[in-house]
Every structure is written in structure tokens, then in C-alpha cells.
Image (cartoon, rainbow, N blue to C red):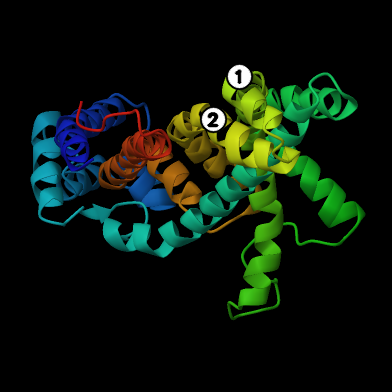
Amino acid sequence: MARMAGRRALFAVPVLGVVTFGVFAVAAASPFDPVKAYAGTAGLTASQENLDQLRANLGVDRPLVARWWDWLTSALQGDFGDSSVMRQPVADVIAERMGWSVLLAATAFLIAILLGTGLGVLAARRPGGWLDRCVSSVAYTLEAAPAFWLGLLAIWFFALKLDVLPAGGLTDAASDVVTFGQVASHLVLPAAVLGVSQLPWFYLYVRQGVADALAEDPVRGARARGLSERTVLLGHALRSGMLPMLTLIGSRVPELITGALLVETVFSWPGIAAATVEAATSVDFCLLAALTVLATAAVLLGNLLSDLLYGLADPRVAFDG
């Protein structure tokens, strides 16, 4: 296990380097002008001399490779630079928002895994039954539904029509303090929407895996020995059927990140979505590179987690092979 994790960590270093260079290259080719974005409305009346001076102060007049190398060497020392659009250090921008994004993504992922596993097991008990047909139809429909559309639908129904949940934000509009109760109530809709958008894949994988496991000889043997249906289902079929789902965890991380950005925007959740959008439209090199590194690292960690979980669940898998 340690050897595999070490190999993955070594592999991640050049990957992150290439990704950050790609961010700087794409941002440099973008039609957006970082100087005008930084100056705001003042840039409309500023002279070309002032704009050139501002460009030099921001360092965007330097060659692409030089900007990227300076940022990379500083980042390796823990300095991610200053965000030109947020007017504060990149580390502070991320620290203020990352916790809320992690809370939203983790809660949604837990909802998707628990609901997907539970519904998948129930549907696999009677393939072709009414529960299997109904839930599978809903799952295939949700696969094609964008997360932002589900968010807007949830706001219309639960916040506007029923008025049982807040429509967005982190706390109530009249509140100037952050309390656990307010955060919990405001988290329900965005976490549920993001979790439901990820649920179909977990459900379909578990359903197929458990259904295949129930038809295998070891499970038939367990039933022939007189074991209860609960023991056969949870102790034998579920463990075998969960193996394909474990590999799905890592592959869903990119979709989870993308969905979280959309959901945060729809529900005005104070995560990294707003910072990402502003960094992209303002060509904020430092903030864009740091956010991209975090997203790439999350994908790599997700893939590593899938392999580790699969190896722990199936002793036949060799970690160091």
C-alpha cells in the first residue's frame, strides 16, 4: 500500500506541473485583459501609460514561461502569490472558501453513496420488479439532468412554492452571525441537489453488481446452507457487488467538482465557485493556477482512494504488484 501511494505521489508531481503550465498558457491566450479587470471602471478612462504601468506592476507583461516559473517556485515554498481580482493573498482566498466547498461536496457525496447503495440493493433483490423499474427510470432521467437545472427546480418547489427551506446563502438575510442551525438548514437544498445529481451512477453500479453477485455459486451455496436472506444479501452479495462501485468513487470526483461549482453558483453558497468564475473572467493567473492544482490533486487522490478501497475490500488485489 505504501509503495503504491509513493508511486502515485511521484507521478502526481509532473502532472501538476504540466497542468499549472497549461493554465498559464490558456489564460495568456484568453481574450480577457487582466489589467482592465483589475482596474475596473477606472480603466475605462485611464491613459495607455497608466495601463502599461499597471501591467508592469502586475507582472502580466512578462513572458509566459517566466510568469509560470516564478509562480511555481514560489508555490513550492508555500507562497501562491496574490490574487489580482480578490486583492488578497491566494492562500487567504482559498482558506476562506475551501471549508464550505468541502462541507457541501462531502455531504453530497455521502448522500449519493448511502442512497445509491440502499436503493441499488433493494432493486437488485427483485430485478424487473416495480421498485427496480421505477428507480431505474428515475436514475436514467437524472443522468441527463444538469445540476443547475435541478437546483433551480428545487428552489422553485421547496423555497418558493412550499417555503420550507431557504433558497440560498449560508445564513438568513437578517442574520449577521453564522450558527450551526442556519448553516444546516441552508445546506439541505444544495447538498441534496448535488447528491441527487451523483446518485444515478452509484445506484446503477450497486444494482448491477449485487444482482450479478446473487446469481453466483457462493451466494447460492449460502442460501442452500439455510442462511437468512438478510445475511446472504448483506454479508455475501453486497460485499461482492460493492467492488465495482468502489472504483467509481475516484472517477466521480471530477463530476463532483464541476457539479459543486454549478450548485454553489445557483444557491449562492460561499465556496470557491465565485472565486473560480472571477479568476477565469479576470485572468487571475495565480488564483487560477492554485485552484486548478487543488482540483487536479482532488482527482488524483480520488483515484488513489478507489484503488485502496478496492484492495482492502478484495484481498486478492496486490497493492505492490
Left or right of 306? Residue 243 is right
- In the image, is residue 198 above or below residue 73? above
At 32% from the left edge and 60% from the top edge, which residue is drawn? 87
Name the one closer to the observer, 20 or 309. 309
Mark 1 to mark 2: distance in Å?
A: 10 Å
Q: Is residue 191 visible?
A: yes
Residue 95 sits in quarter: bottom left
Quadrant where the N terminus lies?
top left
Residue 72 image offset from top left, x and y in percent:
13, 42
Left or right of 3? Residue 128 is right
**Residue type, numbered disc 2:** Ser
At 35% from the left edge and 28% from the top edge, which residue is drawn? 316
At 71% from the left edge and 53% from the top edge, which residue is drawn? 189
**Extreme-front residue of the structure:** 225
Q: Which residue is mark 1?
A: 216
Residue 263 image offset from top left, x and y in percent:
61, 44
Q: Secondary structure at mark 1?
A: loop
Residue 237 image offset from top left, x and y in percent:
61, 31
**Residue type, numbered disc 1:** Glu
Q: Please state which of the two labelled residues, at mark 1 or mark 2, is closer to the viewer.
A: 1
Q: Secondary structure at mark 2?
A: helix
Residue 136 image offset from top left, x and y in percent:
77, 24
Left or right of 278? Residue 55 is left
- In the image, is residue 163 above or below residue 264? below
First in residue order: circle 1 vs circle 2 = 1
Q: Which residue is mark 2?
A: 240
At 49% from the left edge and 49% from the top edge, which residue is drawn? 274
Residue 177 sits in quarter: bottom right
